[in-house]
């Protein structure tokens, strides 16, 4: 197997079950799942031959790159920064464009599907400038220059494809089921909604998918969200019931249907990546590869010697004499304040990735033209912090990352697992340490429209957050 089984992260709340699923590339999948009177605990592992194709082959809707556009790729990259600002200006004036580049107001085509910008989102983009005064005050304490940039021009809106320098947000399982209507579970959800009298009387599939109906955006979102929530509850209850007392409450995947296996896999992935906000660090359309960094998984705020050694040289590298001076200087600069994040599950043994917004830092590179987000320049960062030119909180260190191959990130976007977001750079550069409003909710609310509605519904599941009413 490619990776060992991993337990669900501690920040996820599972009321009845724990599921551990080994990721695989040899056709074998292993599950560990136990129910014990509402108290979840791990009991035993089953390994069975996989009865359906791996994820990348299950969904055939991944968008392939258009070969006819290859000649223009270089020009597009050069002007991407200007395009981001221009596109946001269009949104603020109430205009948008179709995927073919035509003005949607004149094309008459529906561009309000998953990933595109709806009318209500355009209206929200033009009016939403602040969603959390508490977050803004914290940002001002951490980085005054970035805070000023945030408060003078913050923006965020969803886009159809992940862009280097932009974000991808892990969406709830309810959203995934609703937006992947061609999957078996998505079709089951649509059938469930169509059998509702409320669906027949007040809604249609078209009205739920567009803003053409007079029904409010929030009412539409609540309707399909609650329907998906009930479907998940029903399916999971059926899985637990089928386990039976004879099996000690344990679930053998060999006895599950393809639909049930699919739901368990989706459930596990959703819990492991719960409300991730990821910076798209790199992507290559030709090879289908992409790398993202999780922005909202803080690991530490200070660095001791062992942690500093790992950040500088990697987990398995022995420090030699020539590296000792660099280690000492790093600790002098960052020992009291060192924002460190878990960037993802891959490549934890490599040196940390340094992200910041300092254009003239020696040795740094812009991750995407016009993004004003930079990577590298560690030696200059250490020297700058030691001299007082920079503050430690102007930098972020990421241990690990998400690595995608074979267009997997695009596939996960297409099936509704991740939502690509374009945003002003302070949203991506700000620290995510003890935020009063979690970054995921902040970005969702800045986008407005359906995403803001989903954020509000997700907040209703939590009792550990106080409402920011300022």
Image: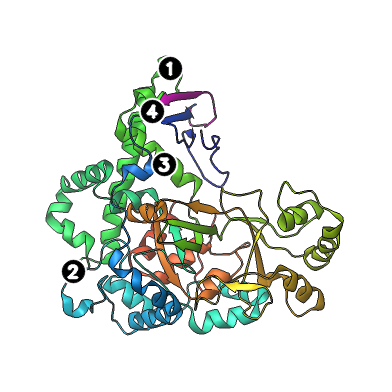
Q: Which residue is mark 2?
A: 214
Query: Which label's residue is closer to the chain start, 4 or 1?
Result: 4
Asked if the residue under mark 1 is in contact with the one under mark 3, i.e. CB atoms within 8 Å, the reply is: no
Q: Disc 3 and disc 1: Cα gap in Å? A: 22 Å
Label 1, secondary structure: give it: helix
Q: Look at discs 4 and 2 and give the one toward the viewer.
A: 4
Q: Residues within 10 Å of mark 4 (few under 14, many from 20)?
A: some
Residue 40 part of the magenta-drawn span = yes
Query: Which label's residue is closer to the chain start, 2 or 1?
Result: 2
Q: Disc 4 and disc 3: Cα gap in Å? A: 14 Å
Residue 58: percent from left, percent from top: 32, 42
Question: Which label sits on residue 247?
Answer: 1
Residue 230 part of the magenta-drawn span = no
Magenta span covers which residues? 37-49
Residue 54 versus residue 461 in the image, above or below:
above
Residue 226 versus residue 20 in the image, above or below:
below
Asked if the residue under mark 2 is in contact with the one under mark 3, i.e. CB atoms within 8 Å, the reply is: no
Q: Disc 3 and disc 2: Cα gap in Å? A: 34 Å
Query: Which label's residue is closer to the chain start, 3 or 1?
Result: 1
Asked if the residue under mark 2 is in contact with the one under mark 4, i.e. CB atoms within 8 Å, the reply is: no
Q: Is residue 40 left or right of residue 74?
A: right
Asked if the residue under mark 1 is in contact with the one under mark 2, i.e. CB atoms within 8 Å, the reply is: no
């Amino acid at each position: 197997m490619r990776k060992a089984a991993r337990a669900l992260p501690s920040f996820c709340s599972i009321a009845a079950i724990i599921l551990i699923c080994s990721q695989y590339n040899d056709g074998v999948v292993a599950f560990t799942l136990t129910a014990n009177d509402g108290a979840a605990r791990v009991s035993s592992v089953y390994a069975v031959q996989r009865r359906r194709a791996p994820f990348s082959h299950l969904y055939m809707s991944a968008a392939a790159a258009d070969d006819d556009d290859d000649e223009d790729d270089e020009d597009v990259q050069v002007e991407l920064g200007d395009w981001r600002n221009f596109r946001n200006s269009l949104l603020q004036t109430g205009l948008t464009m179709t995927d073919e580049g035509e003005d949607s107001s004149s094309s008459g085509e529906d561009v309000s599907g998953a990933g595109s910008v709806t009318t209500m989102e355009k209206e929200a983009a033009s009016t939403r400038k602040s969603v959390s005064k508490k977050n803004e005050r914290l940002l001002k304490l951490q980085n005054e220059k970035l805070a000023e940039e945030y408060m003078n021009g913050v923006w965020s809106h969803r886009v159809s494809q992940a862009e280097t320098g932009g974000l991808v947000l892990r969406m709830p399982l309810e959203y995934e089921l609703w937006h992947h209507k061609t999957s078996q579970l998505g079709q089951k959800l649509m059938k469930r909604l169509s059998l509702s009298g409320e669906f027949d009387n007040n809604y249609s599939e078209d009205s739920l998918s567009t803003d053409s109906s007079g029904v409010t955006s929030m009412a539409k979102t609540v309707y399909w969200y609650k329907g998906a929530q009930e479907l998940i509850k029903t399916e999971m209850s059926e899985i637990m019931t089928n386990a039976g007392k004879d099996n000690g409450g344990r679930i053998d995947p060999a006895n599950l249907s393809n639909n049930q296996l699919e739901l368990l896999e989706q459930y596990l992935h959703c819990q492991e990546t719960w409300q991730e906000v990821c910076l798209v660090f790199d992507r290559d359309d030709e090879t289908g590869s992409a790398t993202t960094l999780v922005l909202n998984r803080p690991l530490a705020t200070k660095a001791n010697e062992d942690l500093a050694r790992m950040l500088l040289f990697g987990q398995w590298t022995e420090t030699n004499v020539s590296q000792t001076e660099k280690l000492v200087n790093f600790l002098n600069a960052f020992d009291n304040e060192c924002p460190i994040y878990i960037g993802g599950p891959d490549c934890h043994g490599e040196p940390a990735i340094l992200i910041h917004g300092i254009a003239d830092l020696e040795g740094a590179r812009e991750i995407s033209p016009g993004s004003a987000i930079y990577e590298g320049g560690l030696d200059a960062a250490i020297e700058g912090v030691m001299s007082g030119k920079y503050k430690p909180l102007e930098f972020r260190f990421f241990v690990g990352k998400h690595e995608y191959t074979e267009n997997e990130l695009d596939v996960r976007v297409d099936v509704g697992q991740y939502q690509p977001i374009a945003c002003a750079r302070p949203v991506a550069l700000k620290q995510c340490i003890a935020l009063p409003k979690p970054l995921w909710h902040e970005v969702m609310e800045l986008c407005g429209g359906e995403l803001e509605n989903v954020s509000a519904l997700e907040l209703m599941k939590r009792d550990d957050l106080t409402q920011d009413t300022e």
